[in-house]
Image: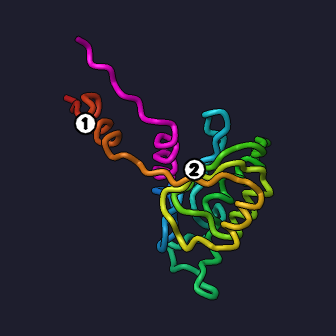
């Protein structure tokens, strides 16, 4: 009998993509990744870091004002800006983000027409952001990544083959 492979659920697949993107972050304080999705297709992605071509926090220290790094553009904003730059509509899309969006990102996501937010970790969840999402009827869902899918991936025979 042939064993049928269990496919990773969509929510975990997209959240894993957001986690992978977070590894490109140039922030020393927190690595965040975000994926914008429409109709089960990735339309944009972003991670937190400096303006392209500028100094990054990993090159120098964070530029802190009132305890916040003002050098960094948040992952959610970078994903929405990627849509704007390349002419891809964000209205009606969903976002997968490694950390619950801050208040400014929440407001930006609402204005961009994001209809659902999936997040991996709570991070200083702002009460006003939560109430805005409730009032605007934007669904919010916590997603956990089941490590068995990652283990299956890295235990796959194609990853374990060594070149001669």
Whole-percent x and y of residue 133?
Answer: 71, 60
Secondary structure beneath label 1: loop
Give whichever of discs 1 and 2 has the lower sequence position: 2
Q: Quadrant of the N terminus?
A: top left
Q: Is residue 76 magenta?
A: no
Residue at the location (66% across, 46% down)? 94
Comparing 55 with 86, the one in front is 86
**What is the x, y in percent for residue 114?**
72, 50
Question: What residue is disc 2 on?
Answer: 96
CA separation, marks 1 and 2? 26 Å
For the point 65% across and 66% down, the residue is: 73
Tell me the quarter of the image containing the C terminus. Answer: top left
Q: Residue 12 versus residue 84: which sits nearer the camera?
A: 12
Mark 2 crowd level (few <14, some 14–19, many ≥20, 10 Å Cα): many
Q: Is residue 146 left or right of residue 89?
A: left
Instruction: Looking at this view, name the residue that lies furthest to the left.
Output: 164
Magenta stretch: give its range: 1-21
């Amino acid at each position: 009998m042939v064993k049928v492979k269990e496919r990773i659920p969509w929510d975990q697949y997209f959240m894993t993509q957001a986690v992978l993107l977070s590894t490109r972050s140039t922030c020393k304080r927190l690595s965040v990744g975000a994926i914008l999705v429409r109709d089960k297709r990735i339309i944009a992605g972003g991670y937190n870091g400096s303006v392209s071509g500028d100094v990054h926090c990993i090159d120098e220290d964070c530029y802190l004002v009132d305890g916040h790094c003002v050098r960094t553009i948040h992952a959610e904003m970078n994903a929405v800006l990627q849509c704007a730059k390349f002419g891809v509509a964000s209205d009606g899309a969903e976002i997968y983000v490694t950390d619950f969006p801050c208040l400014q990102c929440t407001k930006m996501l609402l204005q961009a027409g994001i209809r659902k937010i999936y997040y991996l970790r709570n991070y200083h969840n702002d009460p006003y952001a939560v109430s805005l999402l409730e009032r605007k009827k934007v669904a919010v869902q916590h997603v956990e990544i089941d490590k068995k899918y990652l283990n299956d991936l890295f235990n796959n025979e194609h990853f374990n083959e060594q070149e001669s």
